[in-house]
Each structure stands twice: as structure tokens, then as C-alpha cells.
Image (cartoon, rainbow, N blue to C red):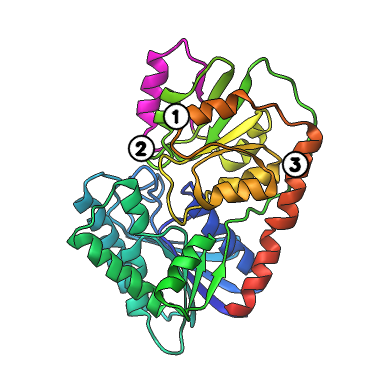
Amino acid sequence: MKDILIITSYFPPEIGAASNRIFQLANGLQKGGFNVNVLTPLPNYPTGKIFEGYKGKFKHISVENGITVNRLWIYASNSKNKLLRLIAMLSYSFSLVWFFMWHKIPKTVIIQSPPLLVAFTCLFFLRKKKRNLILNVSDLWPIAGLELGAFKKNFSYKMLERIERYNYKKASLVLGQSEEILTHVTSLFSKKPTFLYRNFPEFNPPEIVKGPTHKKLKIVYAGLLGIAQGIYKLCQELDYNNIELHIYGSGAEQFKIEDFISSHTELPVFYHGHVTREELHDLLMQYDVAIIPLLNRIYGSVPSKIFEYARLGLPMLYFGGGEGESIIKAHKLGWVAKSGDYNDLNKVISKINTFSVEEKRSIQKEALVHFNFSNQLENLKPLL
């Protein structure tokens, strides 16, 4: 049985696409005959506070679904202060180095990026000619940070670019969740081996049956309520004449959204809090359309919600541009609106007719054929 170590900054019970992606990879490899160990911080995302049950601990070791999970100390913070966020990343990097010093590290290591600094720490301290270091890139930093307005093109940005290039150079293989990510990597290192590894979900697809008809179009958003998603601005910009907006999740904009709803009680906007992924799957089936917005088009980003909702047979309204928009169009998964253009978004919404059961089943069938986690994993295994 081949040993594999996965190093990540996010892992369940934390929520979000990054956590789900890595858990699914680890679980798939474990079931596929690999002996998987995971290195991750004590759970703290997205609150920036160590979860109950883990507080006051320097480390925590558990076996979950046959996977040994080593949770290491971190100075947890979700502060907007860049210095505090840097300290948080450095603290986890320090814990990783300490772990490397006292434990035997297998020859195959999968490293999640971003954060860039954590990935750099792993690639720097684990570099050996015989070690297979696989970099799993889910977002292009620092480019994404620049597009989100988190960075400016200054000395710090240039340093991050140098770290990014070092990471790609030292990786034996780069996994990218989008074609744009792989294009970027090969533009810097033309001979670097790459593999397109999407965040395909793996759960039993529900049976699609005819639900109740609604007087108004019921639109749902589910996920992180962060700056990149722009749900607070979405609440402000939507035309509510013939729609309802239902929101699930948590994150940095949660309180602003709650304040907006409490001060605009005349609008049909409803915040339902955070629910588990399993609960959410059942709840989503009662809605007509799921909206997937990005405040700004982010190069390299493909929201994993596309693949999740397609497996549910849930039509989507995509509002983020880029590769995600191309996927919606190519597989006929719903509608797209011009990125950042709220007038176009409202125009598209006004023309939406709810999908029939047959059309929803067609979306689900498309997902089962083209967004298949097991097939993707089988293609990856020979490279590990």
C-alpha cells in the first residue's frame, strides 16, 4: 500500500470548497488503495477562532474514515490586518517544519496552494530528487489577490510572484482546477507536467421529481459570504419585482447582509444561516435557480458549486465571467449574465423560465457523464 501525505490549510470540520476538495481527494485515494495521512491546522476557518473541542491544544491526531489526520498548532486569525494574517500563515509554517523534523515523510506528498507561503515552506523543506512533490493549485495567487483588490503591484507583490514561481519550479507535478491555471503555469515553465483536477463532487445524485410551482422565481445562494462572492452588493442591486432571494452560509459579509435584511423588511430577501452540506442538498431542491456570483472576474477561478449543483440537477445563473461561464454554456447548465453588470443580471433574470423535470434531469445526466470524480481520480492515480 503506497503512502501519501496531503498537506492543506483547510480540512473538515471546516467548511468551504477548499475543505471539501481536499477531503474528497483524501477519501478517494484512501478507498483506492493508498495509505493517506493529512497535515492540517487546528480547525479555525472561516471564523478565525479555533473550534470547540480543539482549543488549548498544540496538536490533535485522529483517524477519520481510515485517514490519519494530524492537526497542528496555528495562531488563528481572519483579521483584515495583513500583518496578523501573515503571522497566522507563519505560525502554521513553523508547525509544519517542526513536524517534518520529527516524522518520516513519505515519498509522495500533495501540497495545497494557496496559501503560497505554506506551499513554499513544504516545497523548500521537503525538496529531494527522489520525492514526488505534487502541487494542487486551486486559485492563482498573487494574481487573484490583485484582481480582488487585496494586493497592489509593489515590492510585496513581486516577492509573492517569486514565491509562486519557486513553487511551480520545485513541484514534480502541478494539479490545477481550471484550464486557465494550467495555461498560466506552462507559460512560466513550458515543460512542467500538469493535470486538470476539477473539484468534482462524489455523492448519490437525488431523484428529481416535480415540485410545487412558485408565484415568484425562488433564487438561492449557498456558500461563503466573503468579499469575493459579493453577496451584500447582490442584495442591494437585484430587482425584486418577481423574485425571492434565499441565502445560506457564513463569512465576512454575514453581519452586513443581516443588517441589510433587517433594514429592508419590504424586500423578499431571506437569510437562513449555515447548514451542513447534506442538509443543504435537500434544501436546494426546493428552489428554481441557484445563483453563482463573483464580485469581480478572477482569472483561474472556477467555482466548484457548478459541479455540485449540476449533480443535483439544479439550474444555475452564473455571474462571474471566465472559464466558469464557458462551462455553463458548453454543458447547457442554465444562464449567464455579464460579469459585474447588474443591469444585465436583472435583464437575464426577468427572462428566466423555470426548468421542467426533464430539463433538470438532463443537467444531472450531463454532470454524471462529464463531471465524474471516480473517472478523474483513476486518471490521476498513475501520476502519484
Residue located 60% across and 65% down the image: 66
Q: Residue 252: give its label.
A: 2
Whole-number angstrom distance, CA of label 2 to CA of label 3: 31 Å
Element assignment for label 3? loop
Disc 1 to disc 2: CB gap under 8 Å: no
Element assignment for label 2? loop
Q: Could you tell me the amino acid type at mark 1?
A: Leu
Question: Which residue lies most toward the top here?
Answer: 266
The residue lying toward the viewer, choosing from 143 and 101, is 143
Q: Which residue is mark 3?
A: 206
Number of marks present in the image shown:
3
Answer with the quarter of the image where residue 279 lies: top right
Q: Could you tell me the amino acid type at mark 3?
A: Pro
**Could you classify mark 2 by the number of other residues whose Cα lies within 10 Å: few (under 14), some (14-19), or many (20 or more)?**
some
Answer with the quarter of the image where residue 350 lies: top right
**Could you classify mark 3 by the number of other residues whose Cα lies within 10 Å: few (under 14), some (14-19), or many (20 or more)?**
few
| Quarter of the rendering occupied by the C terminus | bottom right
Residue 190's x, y, as percent?
A: 46, 78
Disc 2 to disc 3: CB gap under 8 Å: no
Q: Which residue is mark 1?
A: 234
Residue 30's x, y, as percent?
A: 62, 68
The residue lying toward the viewer, choosing from 102 and 158, is 158
Is 252 magenta? The answer is yes
Q: Nearer the viewer, mark 3 or mark 1?
A: 1
Q: Earlier in the sequence, mark 1 or mark 2?
A: 1
**Could you classify mark 1 by the number of other residues whose Cα lies within 10 Å: few (under 14), some (14-19), or many (20 or more)?**
some
In the picture shown, does residue 42 fall above or below 148?
below
Span highlighted in magenta in the image: 251-273
Q: Earlier in the sequence, mark 2 or mark 3?
A: 3
The residue lying toward the viewer, choosing from 215 and 351, is 351
Residue located 63% across and 75% down the image: 381
